[in-house]
Image: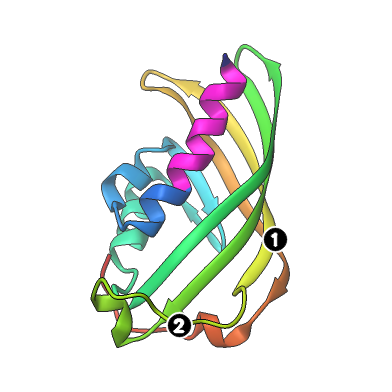
Amino acid sequence: MIERVCEKLSIAYAHHLDFQRCAEFADLFAQDGILDVNGEVAGREAIAKAMHSRSPKIHSRHVLTNILIDVIDHAKARGISYLSLYRHIGEESLNDKVIAMSATSAVGHYSDEFVPTNEGWRFAKRSLSLAFRDPTAFERPSRGC
């Protein structure tokens, strides 16, 4: 049961991020949760603020596979999920048309710590480690969620 709930958190993370659902994304974390993808952001409010600053010119799909959850005890679980990231930055991201691309933007994995809260299980910490990265897919566009 705990394994499935934590697996669903990983899947919801990708979905909310890709569809720019900033509030729902932040709610996946404990109040003092930490997101470490390009430096640490601590606390649900700070995570929400960081997501709202994400540019609408970023069009992405986070494909998660090999999700493995280990329940440590009734108050802690750990997990890992492999990431294949497809990402485009540009004006084309602002409409619903298919965007041409030629390669995966990044491949890596998330390391997760999960804790139970009054709202259910949440991320205590999610850290990203990349094995492969196309630097052109990570240029910084202007703000927005």
Q: Kindly identify which residue carries mark 2.
A: 100
Q: Is residue 98 above or below residue 63?
A: below
Instruction: Identify which residue is drawn at 69% across, 20% down.
Output: 71
Q: Is residue 25 above or below residue 90?
A: above
Q: Between 26 and 99, which is closer to the camera in this rendering?
A: 99
Is 3 contained in the magenta span?
yes
Instruction: Identify which residue is drawn at 50% across, 32% down.
Output: 8
How far apart are the two marked residues, 1 and 2, measured between alpha carbons? 23 Å
Location of residue 29 in the rendering, given as x and y in whole percent from the top left corner: 44, 38
Type of the residue with mark 2: Ala
Can I make out residue 38 in this image?
no
Is 10 contained in the magenta span?
yes
Could you tell me how many numbered marks the image carries? 2
Q: Earlier in the sequence, mark 1 or mark 2?
A: 2
Instruction: Identify which residue is drawn at 50% across, 20% down.
Output: 116
Q: Please, which colouring scheme is shown? A: rainbow
Type of the residue with mark 1: Gly
In the picture provided, is 29 more to the left or to the right than 144? right
Instruction: Identify which residue is drawn at 36% across, 53% down.
Output: 46
Location of residue 92 in the rendering, given as x and y in whole percent from the top left corner: 31, 83
Badge 2, how many Cα within 10 Å: few under 14, some, many 20+?
Answer: few
Residue 18, by quadrant, is bottom left
Q: Kindly identify which residue carries mark 1.
A: 108
- Give the magenta part as a residue range: 2-13
